[in-house]
């Protein structure tokens, strides 16, 4: 099973790095704007930095990021 993970609206990211700290295998900080994005290897569309598809075994860390994001912009659902 696969999970769809996305950040919306990404512009609301405050770059506190909680998602990276909790789930660094899925999230990274952008060199361009300093906001969090999905690591490239999980993106189906390389230009869509706010959406990715990760294996189900990453659910716990993604869920921790979803619950801990202070702006609540991280979402996940079964893909």
Image: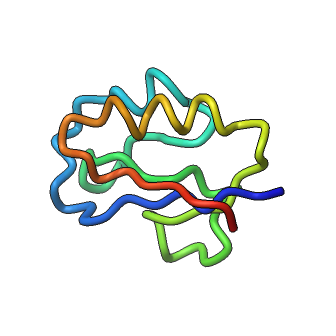
Q: Position of residue 9 (x, y in %)?
A: 24, 65
Looking at the image, is 21 positioned above or below residue 54?
Answer: above
Q: Farthest residue to the right: give it.
A: 1
21 and 63: which is toward the camera: 63
Q: Position of residue 79 (x, y in %)?
A: 69, 68
Q: Position of residue 24 (x, y in %)?
A: 55, 30
Q: Total marks drawn?
A: 0
| Residue positioned 66% across, 61% down in the render | 78
Colouring chosen for the image of the structure: rainbow
30 and 5: which is toward the camera: 5
| Residue positioned 52% across, 36% down in the render | 63
Q: Farthest residue to the front: give it.
A: 78
Q: Position of residue 61 (x, y in %)?
A: 58, 29
Question: In this rendering, would 69 be left or right of 59?
Answer: left
Based on the displayed image, in which of its 4 quarters is residue 77 positioned?
bottom right
Looking at the image, is 78 positioned above or below residue 28?
Answer: below
| Residue positioned 62% across, 30% down in the render | 60
58 and 77: which is toward the camera: 77
| Residue positioned 47% across, 29% down in the render | 64
Question: In this rendering, would 10 be left or right of 44?
Answer: left
Looking at the image, is 27 positioned above or below residue 22?
Answer: below
Q: Which part of the image, by quadrant, shows the N terminus?
A: bottom right
Looking at the image, is 30 positioned above or below residue 6?
Answer: above
């Amino acid at each position: 099973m696969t999970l769809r993970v996305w950040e919306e609206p990404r512009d609301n990211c405050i770059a506190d790095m909680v998602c990276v700290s909790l789930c660094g295998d899925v999230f990274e900080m952008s060199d361009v704007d300093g906001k969090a994005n999905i690591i490239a290897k999980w993106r189906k569309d390389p230009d869509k930095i706010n959406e990715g598809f990760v294996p189900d075994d990453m659910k716990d860390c993604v869920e921790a990021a979803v619950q801990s994001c202070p702006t609540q912009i991280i979402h996940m659902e079964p893909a």
